[in-house]
Amino acid sequence: MHNFKKKQDIAEALFSKGRGQKKLFDRARRTRNEVFSNKVEVRSVIEYSNICRQACNYCGMSRESGLKRYIMSDDETTDSIKRLYGYGRRVLIIQSGEFHSEHLFENLLTLIKRMKENFPGLTIMGSFGNLSLPEYKIVKEAGVERYLLKFETSDSKLYKKVKPSDSLFNRLRHLEILKKTGFKVSSGNITGLPGQSVESLAEDLLLLKRLRLFMGSTSAFIPNDMSNYANWPSADINLVLNFMAILRILCPTILIPATSSLELLVKDGQYLGLMSGANVVTLHDGTPKNDEKNFVLYKKDRYKPKDVLLEIVARAGLKHSFDPLI
Ligand code: 5AD
């Protein structure tokens, strides 16, 4: 059995098909179930704003896209948190494009602080892009305990190509700062980026292991109509699922989401993600309906209703938990 210490072994396993692939998925599921006893963390996301100062070629919310921009009002945000808490959710992701504004740092964080006091047992994961050290500290002090910042690719040349407004060096520096600030840090890549090799994906996996995260993820590249990569082909589903399974084997104790990008690739993609070792799904029920259509990471209509996602979890033989697993 592979121990995936060598890059070459990982690259080979990324090509798994047929019986080899079935074995890989079995092992990934066993590894997950031993650690998490069949539990899947189900959380909700609030897409707070789509304003962004980055210019990622794969993303529909790039500063160069002609998208209509929004910021959720304080009332909308408060109502959303209250509603989700009422549904029993105890983990919320609050996500936005990357931007600096007083609004974000005063209104949103004050509001989060108040919500954390009023609603016991709430865990918040922030995803606001690269901020400054003082800004990270303020976010942490407001009661945000988790932070999501993806490195997207471990190949510095590819990084510059797909995300010209940033560098891999800078992104990794931010991940270190986030750890030092005391966040539970989550990161990951995109599988299937234009110009990405299988060796480079193997490096992404080794980097995910080295980073010692509490959550690691991959999203499947989806050509977004609003982005500069609108005409490139989508990721290969088998490559994405193999990536997830190897990640589970390399890092048994981390959270791994079955992202909505899988569902855009193939019908039942998120179910297949759970069958390859994932243990998290995200419900898209925190964003007001009229803003939803403007939060376009991959594509419009990436939202699956709550009941369908919970049914998928049950069908995979797993039990959903609205409480944090870690
Ligand atoms: N395909 C796949 N993943 C994408 N992301 C953004 N756009 C795309 C796309 N077209 C992912 C990036 C980003 C996260 C919020 O969404 O990894 O960090």
Image (spheres, rainbow, N blue to C red):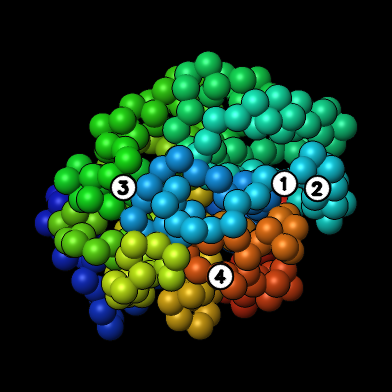
Q: Residue at x 23, y 45 (%)?
A: 160
User: Could you tell me how far apart the alpha carbons at marks 4 and 1 are, in whole angstroms?
Assistant: 18 Å
Would you say 312 lies left or right of 209 here? Answer: right
User: Could you tell me how far apart the alpha carbons at marks 1 and 3 are, in whole angstroms?
Assistant: 26 Å
Query: Which residue, given by chain and number where applicable, does mark 4 sit on?
Result: 300
Q: Residue at x 20, y 42 (%)?
A: 156
Query: Which residue, given by chain and number where applicable, does mark 1 sit on?
Result: 72
Name the disc covering residue 149, or none: none
Q: Position of residue 17 (x, y in %)?
A: 26, 79
**Can residue 93 be seen by looking at this rendering?**
no
User: Could you tell me how far apart the alpha carbons at marks 2 and 3 are, in whole angstroms?
Assistant: 31 Å
**Can residue 124 be seen by looking at this rendering?**
yes
Name the disc covering residue 163, or none: 3
| Mark 2 neighbour density, 10 Å: few (under 14) some (14–19) many (20 or more) | some
Q: Amino acid at mark 3?
A: Lys
Say which label, 4 or 3, has the lower sequence index: 3
Task: Say which of 49 and 268 sits in front.
Answer: 49
